[in-house]
Image (cartoon, rainbow, N blue to C red):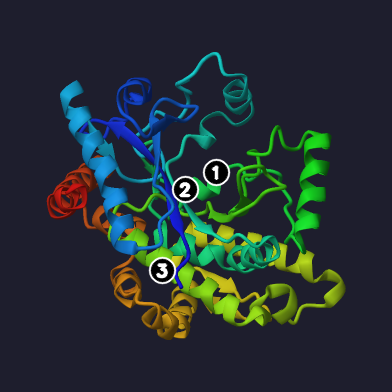
């Protein structure tokens, strides 16, 4: 049985030339389903939780199609792929809601390091202890999902040296987050952070993975993977999601996959050792994505991200096939074969294109592919 899945998609708006322009106030006022981020250059939409991938594809494409039509009505505006301010400027915060005190705190504390675009993947798990176990497994494997989705090699008109410049600069908060051993552990830890002021509110847990729900941390119903860069291709996003879901189904079938159970690190320091290993893996994946040398959470052995993902793919393929989502999982192979967006853009740049040319080409390519998807999907879905 498939789990429910939903997405929070953050995107930049701007011109076909790659200039990012803040339009979120007008978008939120005139289009249903869109919400503002602290900086007006971002806008976000959320898909409803659904089990079927075919319906999810429609829900991913339709709002973007409507947003593109609205932007064209405003002027020569479009959506800009990637997860950082690729062409700049990076030194100024453009407030979307000047009267919001939480936004004031974010601007004053973090500046433009938080002005990034990404996709948050939410997967429904109602049982709180199963949810904690799922968060532990996805947390230690989150660097693999970053490696698949990296799309931010440029910042402020420069090559940064990182495939995910977003995750290199993004301020993970609090700085140290353990693997939660139980729901009670999560509640107690959250209450401690709020009392100490290391978190401003229950939303201020900015880690690669977090449990989420209607009344955090008490009522929880989903796992939220926050590490992924923005994936422009909805089919690729569904492939990454299918890999996560198949892995979680595998965990449900085999609870021993729990890192706190299966890891061979010393018992008394296992939690801290796994967190340190995962933090290092995240940094390596942010820098080199699929080419990064990581350390496996089971025993610390070195393994290249691409090889680890390939092994994971082969391990969960029978589960995906048995649950009818093999066709949605299979595009992972294309990412492994051709590279993620960051790698493809860097190859174009190394072949002689300027950064603006690469960005402008990506804008046009994504617009064209989305128009094709919208023609194929949106009318049938609406009927």
Instruction: List the single residue furthest toward the top.
Output: 99
- Report the Cα–Cα distance between label 2 and label 3: 25 Å
Chain-order first, disc 1 or disc 3: 1
Q: Secondary structure at mark 1?
A: helix
Image mark for residue 366: none
Q: Position of residue 184 (x, y in %)?
A: 80, 56
Q: Is residue 257 left or right of residue 245?
A: right
Distance from Cα at disc 1 to Cα at disc 3: 28 Å
Left or right of residue 36: residue 352: left
**Quarter of the view holding residue 127:** bottom right
Residue hosting label 1: 169
Residues under numbered marks 2 and 1 in contact, where contact means CB atoms less than 8 Å apart: yes
In the foreground, 1 or 361: 1
Whether tag 2 and tag 3 are in contact, CB under 8 A, the answer is no
Task: Give the SS element for disc 2.
Answer: helix
Vertical order, 128 against 29 (above or below)? below
Residue labelled with disc 3: 242
For image coordinates 66% across by 42% down, the residue present is 215
Look at discs 2 and 3 and give the one toward the viewer. Answer: 3
Q: Which residue is mark 2?
A: 165
**How packed is label 2: few (under 14 Cα within 10 Å), some, or many (20 or more)?**
many
What residue sits 70% from the left and 81% below the top? 262
């Amino acid at each position: 049985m498939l789990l429910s899945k939903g997405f929070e998609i953050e995107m930049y708006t701007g011109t076909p030339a790659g200039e990012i322009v803040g339009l979120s106030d007008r978008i939120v006022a005139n289009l249903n389903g869109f919400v503002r981020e602290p900086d007006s250059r971002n806008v976000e939409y959320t898909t409803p939780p659904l089990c079927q991938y075919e319906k999810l594809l429609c829900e991913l494409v339709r709002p973007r199609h409507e947003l593109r039509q609205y932007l064209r009505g405003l002027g020569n505006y479009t959506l800009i792929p990637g997860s950082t301010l690729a062409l700049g400027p990076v030194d100024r915060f453009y407030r979307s809601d000047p009267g919001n005190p939480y936004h004031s705190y974010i601007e004053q504390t973090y500046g433009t390091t938080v002005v990034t675009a990404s996709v948050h993947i939410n997967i429904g798990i109602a049982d709180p202890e199963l949810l904690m176990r799922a968060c532990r497994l996805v947390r230690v494997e989150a660097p693999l999902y970053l490696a698949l989705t990296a799309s931010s090699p440029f910042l402020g008109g420069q090559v940064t040296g990182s495939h995910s410049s977003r995750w290199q600069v993004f301020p993970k908060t609090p700085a140290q987050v353990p693997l939660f051993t139980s729901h009670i552990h999560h509640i107690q830890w959250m209450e401690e952070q709020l009392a100490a002021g290391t978190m401003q509110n229950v939303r201020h847990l900015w880690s690669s993975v977090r449990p989420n729900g209607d009344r955090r941390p008490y009522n929880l119903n989903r796992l939220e993977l926050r590490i992924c860069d923005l994936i422009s291709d909805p089919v690729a996003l569904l492939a990454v999601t299918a890999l996560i879901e198949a892995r979680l189904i595998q965990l449900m079938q085999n609870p021993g996959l729990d890192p706190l159970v299966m890891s061979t690190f010393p018992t008394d320091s296992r939690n801290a050792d796994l967190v340190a290993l995962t933090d290092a893996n995240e940094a390596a994946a942010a820098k080199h994505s699929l080419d990064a040398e990581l350390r496996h959470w089971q025993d610390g052995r070195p393994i290249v991200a691409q090889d680890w993902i390939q092994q994971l793919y082969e391990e969960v393929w029978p589960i995906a096939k048995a649950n009818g989502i093999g066709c949605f999982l299979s595009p992972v192979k294309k990412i492994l074969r051709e590279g993620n967006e960051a790698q493809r853009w860097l190859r174009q740049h190394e072949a002689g294109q300027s950064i603006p040319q690469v960005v402008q080409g990506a804008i046009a390519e994504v617009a064209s592919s989305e128009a094709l998807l919208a023609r194929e999907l949106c009318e049938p879905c609406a009927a």
